[in-house]
Image: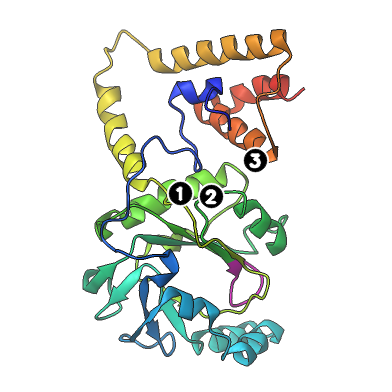
Amino acid sequence: MDASCPFQQLGIKTLSQPSHTHAITCYAMDSIFDATVSYYANAKSTSGDTVTLRAFLRNKTHRAAVEALRKEQDPERRSALKRDLRAATVSGTFSKRKASECTQYNGCICIDFDGKDNADTPPAAIKAMLAEYAEIAYAGLSASGTGVFAIVPTNLTDVAHHAKAVEILGSVFEKIGLKYDRSCKDVCRLRFISVDDEAYWNEAANSFDARHWLSAAECEPKRRQNIPATVKHTEADRDRNKIHRYVEAIESRGCDITANYADWVRIGMAISSAMGVEGENYYHRISQ
């Protein structure tokens, strides 16, 4: 999106346009895929080996086991086959598979989009949607083949903030119509090995500015407490007035403020963040 886009002046943030950038200081690497993760024999294992994220994702030696899982129709048998697969803790290494036993946190968020929760959007379409965002390092089929998982590098350095960051990131995806699995908040959750010859890879993925979003989330309740009781929705009213003026200016000048479909989606997300369903009319007006 062009830096002069009026909606950026509202201070509304999107996944691709964080207001601040920070390097991941907890882990020095040339690529996020060089991060180390704990690698387990199966779901019952509590201690594992250490491998790179790249090695885990590119491991094709278990293709036959993954394909057998995808072909199995019996739910109980499918569950048993899945539990027997190799797995990894994408967000770091652990001496034992417990959040309190994290030995190296790499700042990565692994987020699931299950097929049953996104029944109207096939896996290929989900991957295509995710690939539009610069912060997506990887998007591929889940072990079952019915869903998609994505890996997002962040600038987090404290494992204690992981769960909240997942909530924030998940809410961003929900605004574009993708429902995420909330159990991803568990930093030591297992990611079962999978195979996807058409997975999306981005070696140069940007870091999601989780620290800024966490700071904003902490400040919001305090800001609300400091608003005098006699003044209601002052900030919201200001945002509405700004959007109203910008939309009128765009219409009167007949200008196109988007360069591509992704920009159009992000502007819609920004208006939705500020106005909710009330912003639908404005979004339609600038889409003409």
Of pointers 1 and 2, the one earlier in the residue sequence = 2
Residue at 42%, 51% (x, y): give it.
Answer: 207
Give the CA separation, mark 1 to mark 2.
14 Å
The quarter of the image holding the C terminus is top right
Q: Which mark is residue 262?
A: 3
**Which residue reaches farthest front?**
30
Applied colour scheme: rainbow
Tag 1 secondary structure: helix
**Which residue reaches farthest right?**
288
Q: Is residue 44 above or below residue 18?
A: below
From which residue to which does the magenta span run?
140-147
Q: Is residue 86 above or below residue 137?
A: below
Closer to the camera: disc 1 or disc 3? 3
Q: Which residue is mark 2?
A: 134
- Left or right relative to 65: residue 23: left
Q: Is residue 117 above or below residue 235?
A: below
- Which amino acid, by three-letter code, is at mark 2? Ala
- Which amino acid, by three-letter code, is at mark 3? Ala
- Left or right relative to 179: residue 98: left
Give the CA separation, mark 3 to mark 2.
11 Å
- Which amino acid, by three-letter code, is at mark 1? Leu
Of pointers 3 and 2, the one earlier in the residue sequence = 2
